[in-house]
Amino acid sequence: MGNHRRDHAERRRRGVSRGVVATVVVLLLLAAAVVGWFAVRDRSAEEAEQAARACVEGEATLAVTADPDVADVLRTLGESWTAGGPVVRDHCITTAVTAAPTAVAAEALAATTYDPSAAGPEPALWVPSDTAAAAAVAARGTDITPRSVVTSPVVLGAAPTVADGLAAAGSRWTDLPALASSADPLRLALPTGPATAATLVAVATDPGTETQPLTVDRATSPAAVSAVSRLALAARDVPADIADVDAALDTIVRAPDPTAAPVRAVPVTEQQLAMRIREGQQLAAFRPAGPTPMADHPGLVLATADPTARAAAAEFLDYVRSAPGREAFLAAGFRVPGESTDTPDPIVGLDFPGVDPVAPVPTADARAAVLGTAAEPSRPASTTVLLDVSGSMESIDGGSTRLDNVRAALGQATGALSGDGRLGVWIYSRGLDGSRPYRVLAPLGPSAESARTGLDALSGITPQTATSTYASVLAAYRSAVENWSPDGPQSVLLVTDGPNDDTSISPSSFLQSLADAADPARPVRLDVVSLADASDIDTLRSAAGQTGGDVIVTASSDPGLAGTLERLTSAR
C-alpha cells in the first residue's frame, strides 16, 4: 500500500511539472507572437515610409511662371526645395521656373487655349509683377487668396543730380506731364513694362481721389486722357533704340552730362535700381509725392491646375515665405512682407524708406484704358469758344441765368485743359463791336492763359440784343483756319440758345460760305452746344456735319454741361 501511495504522488508531481512546462511554452509562444507583431508593424511602417520616399504615384513637375525680376530667385529657391525631396500626394516634386514678362504671361493665360510657345509650360503657380495684372486669370480662378511674395516700390531712376532736383521741387506723379512737356523737358522714357504702366496709372489719377482705385470713368475723362497723352507724346522724343528699362538706365549712366542726356529718367522698381547701385553705377531713385505704386508680386495658385500641382504650389509658396526665401529676396534688393515688412540694408545712394500710402490697385478696365491712351495718345486741341451773349441768355434756368450757368461750366471745363493746347474765347450778339456782331475776349493762345483772360473778361459781360449766329460762326471759323496748327485737332465750339435772327445771311448762304471757308489741308470742325431746341437746329446740324463736328442739345443748368464743354475743348 505504501508503494501505491508513492506511485500516486509521483504521478501527481509529474503532472504538475508537465502543466508548468505547458504554461511556460504557452507564455513563450505568446511572447514570440507579440514580438513578431511589433516586428511586422515596424517593418510595415518602414516599408510605408520607403514607399513614400519612393513616390508610389511617381514624379510630378511643379510648373512656375514668374516675371523676370523675381524668376532667378524663385529658380534658386525651387532647386533648394526640390533638393529636400518634397513629396506631395505620393508624388516626388520637381520645380521648374520659367521667366516670362508679366504682360506676355497674362495674355497667354487669358487665352481660351493656352499656348506654351508664348510663355512656356502652363503654370500651376504664377508670380506676376503686380496684382493689377492678375485680372488676366480671373476666368481661371485662384486656389488660395493671393498674397504678395515680395514687393518693390515703383520709382523714377535717374542720375543723382537729376533725382535731387526733382525731389527739391516736390514734384508729384501728376506733375510728370508738365515736366515732360516743359521748355526744359524731363525726357522721361516710357518703355513697355509694369513700372511704366503703374506710372501712367498714377499720372491719370485725380489727386482729390488718389486713395481710391482708379476707375474707368476717371481713366477715360478728358483730364486723364490729356495727362497720359501729354506724357506719351513727350516720350516719343526719346530715341527709338532706347526700348527697354536696361537701355534707358545704361543711357543715363553713360551720359557725360546727365542733364543733357537723351533720357533723364525712367520708371523702374526700387529693386532694379538697388542691383545696379550695388554694382557701383551712379543712379538714384526719385520718389514723386503721392500714393506710391507698388510691384507687389502676388503668388497665384491657378485653380485650373491638377490637384497635385496646386498642393505642390501651396507648399512651395510656404517655403518661399520661410527664412531661406526671405533672406534670398532681401539679398536681391526686394522688400519682404510679413507681420512687418523687412527691407534690405541701405546702400550708398539708396535707402529704403517706409511707403505710406501705397497706391490702390486700379480696376482692370481702368488700367486697360490708360494703356490704350498711351499707345494711341490724343493730341492737344486748339479750340475757339464762340459764346452767345444775346438777350435770351438772360433767361433763368435752374435758379441762374443761362449766361451765368455757362460761365460757371466754362470755368470748370477750362480748368482741366492741358498746358500745351490752345484756346480762344469769343462772344457774339448783334452790334457787339461796332458793326461786327462778335468780340474777341482772348485770341487763340496757350489754354491756361487764354482761359484766364477770357473768363475774366466774360465775368463783366451782360446779355445784349439779337442773335447774329451765322455771321459770327463764319468769322470764327475763318480765323481758326487762318491760325491752324498741325499739332492737334482744331475746332470752333459754338454755345448758343439760338435761333439766328440776323436775316442778312440765309441758312443756305451760311452753309455755302462755311463750305467755301473750309480748307482740306487745314481741317477745322464746328461743334455746337445748343441750350434750347432752336428753330434753326437743323441748319446747325448740317453745318456741324459738313465739318465733322457734333451737335449736343442740353440745358444750361444740366450738371453735365461742364463735362461736355471739357470734352469738346480737350485733346482728342
Image: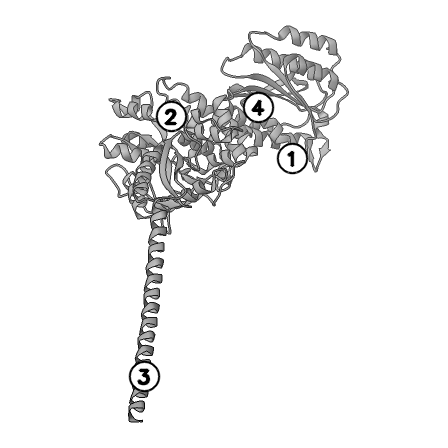
Q: Residue furthest left?
A: 280
**Mark closer to the chain start, 4 or 1:** 1
- At label 1, which amino acid type do we have? Pro
Label 4: which secondary element: loop
Q: Nearer the viewer, mark 2 or mark 4?
A: 2
Question: Percent from the top left, x then y, of residue 149?
Answer: 38, 42
Question: Percent from the top left, x then y, of residue 72?
Answer: 32, 34
Q: Is residue 509 visible?
A: yes
Task: Name the residue at 59% across, 17% down.
Answer: 491
Instruction: Check residue 569 in the rendering and tell me which mark sits there, or answer none.
Output: 4
Q: Nearer the viewer, residue 29 or 74?
A: 29
**Mark closer to the chain start, 2 or 1:** 2
**Mark closer to the chain start, 2 or 4:** 2
Callouts 4 and 3 close, C-beta under 8 Å: no
How dense is the environment of label 2, judged by Cα within 10 Å: few (below 14), some, or many (20 and up)?
many
Residue linked to disc 1: 559
Q: Nearer the viewer, mark 1 or mark 3?
A: 3
Instruction: Check residue 188 in the rendering and tell me which mark sits there, or answer none.
Output: 2
Q: Nearer the viewer, residue 53 or 565?
A: 53
Q: Nearer the viewer, mark 2 or mark 1?
A: 2
Residue linked to disc 3: 11
What count of labels does the image hold?
A: 4
How dense is the environment of label 3, judged by Cα within 10 Å: few (below 14), some, or many (20 and up)?
few
138 sits to left or right of 388:
left
Callouts 1 and 3 close, C-beta under 8 Å: no
- At label 4, which amino acid type do we have? Thr
The answer to whether 345 is drawn above or below residue 499 in the figure is below
Q: Residue furthest top?
A: 516
The image quadrant where one finds the C terminus is top right
Q: CA distance from mark 2 to mark 1?
A: 37 Å
The answer to which image quadrant residue 350 occupies is: top left
